Amino acid sequence: MKSYFIFIIVLTAVYVIYYAVIIVQDLYGKKGTDKPKEEVFDLGDPEEEQSVTVTESDTGFHVGDEQYETEVVSAVMPAPQETERAGGTGKTAMEEKLERLKARMEEQMEETTPYLSDAFTDEELYRAMIAKGKTDNRPELEWKPLKDRL
């Protein structure tokens, strides 16, 4: 017999004996002598602590008897004073708000310079892909289909 089959037979016999011993211990072993594997924490009397009410308002929030003021800064919604200053019709007020919002956003934007002198739009690039690199009134794109590389 090959050594592999001898190993399998010996290993199977050892497993059968091991599981037989474990089953006999579970059936006839001493019960209730194990230590409990859980911890018990004394949390005290639950009636000692009182809950605190928390309420929210337009200007802040209240925790119990204390009041906290908060200042809300919104990039989209203008402050109430801005709507009063705009005065006029709703449309002009919205246009002014939009202009202010655009100005704030432009302040945060970075300056970039394009690095392609003759950039393609998505439609032009799609047409060039369909035409395999040939475009109208532009230099021909170098077109290398994926199948050529494989």
Image (spheres, rainbow, N blue to C red):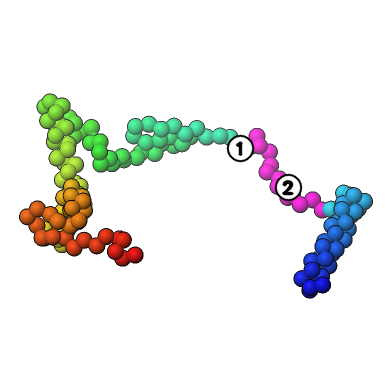
**What residue sits right under mark 1 in the picture?**
49
> In the image, is residue 44 part of the stretch drawn in magenta?
yes
Closest to the observer, 108 or 44: 108
Q: Is residue 55 visible?
A: yes
Residue 54 lies, in percent from the top left, at 47, 34
Taking the image as shown, residue 143 lies to the left or right of residue 65, namely left
Q: Secondary structure at mark 2?
A: loop
Q: Residue at x 25, y 38 (%)?
A: 76
Q: Residue at x 9, y 53 (%)?
A: 136
- Image quadrant holding the N terminus, namely bottom right
Taking the image as shown, residue 140 lies to the left or right of residue 22, namely left
Q: Residues within 10 Å of mark 2 (few under 14, many from 20)?
A: few
Q: Tell me the CA gap for discs 1 and 2.
A: 20 Å
Residue 108 lies, in percent from the top left, at 21, 52
Residue 104 lies, in percent from the top left, at 19, 46
Q: Which mark is residue 3?
A: none
Q: Residue at x 18, y 63 (%)?
A: 142
Which region is colored magenta?
A: 35-49
